[in-house]
Amino acid sequence: MAVAVEAPWSFYIIQNHGCTYAGVSPDPVKRLRKHNGEISGGAKYTQSKGPGWTHVCLVHGFQTKNQALQFEWAVKHVPPRDSGGLLNRVKKLYCVLNKPHWTSKAPAAPTVPLQLEWSIAKPAFFHDQPLPAYVSEIHHNEI
């Protein structure tokens, strides 16, 4: 019997007029279209803010949906949980990337090679912030 291979999942951060949102998807480009109302299925939060959402960054390489959801949960639960804005979202992302495990039930982080892909200029605060060896980084102007 053949075992179904799961599509790779990505974590993403998007922004629109000073608001940010983080989520996971096997197809972040299609998901962005949903957030912008181009096709049905976007989150209520992003639809309430109108179109204009753009990717800030994506983290690729999660081998299962569960890994991506564990990572998303970890990023959203870095204290203080009520701090918003792009800088705080990215700080929380870096915090989780530097943990040995994203959650207590997640695999050891170094066993899941990840790629951090920037679609905007990387915030200056993070130019000197180290990333662990299991995370590679690429920069783009647009995704």
Image: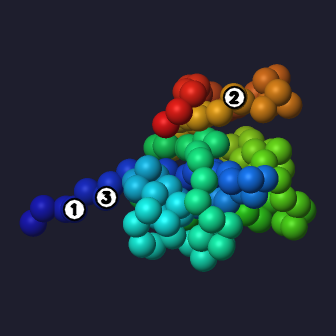
**SS for dot 2:** loop
Looking at the picture, how far across and down is residue 75, in whole percent?
71, 57
In the image, taking residue 12 as reference, residue 104 lies left or right, namely right
As shown in the figure, which amino acid type bears the numbered disc 3? Glu
Residue 55 sits in quarter: top right
Which residue corresponds to mark 1?
4
Task: State which tag comes first along the sequence, 3 or 2.
Answer: 3
**SS for dot 3:** loop
Which residue corresponds to mark 3?
6
Farthest residue to the top: give it.
Answer: 128
Q: Residues within 10 Å of mark 1 (few under 14, many from 20)?
A: few
Task: State which tag comes first along the sequence, 1 or 2.
Answer: 1
Looking at the picture, how far across and down is residue 65, in whole percent?
44, 62
Which residue corresponds to mark 2?
121
Mark yes or no: residue 107 visible: no
Residue shown at the point (55%, 27%) measured from the top left: 140
- Residue 56's disc number: none
Residue shown at the point (50%, 56%) measured from the top left: 32
Mark closer to the observer (3, 2): 2
As shown in the figure, which amino acid type bears the numbered disc 1? Ala
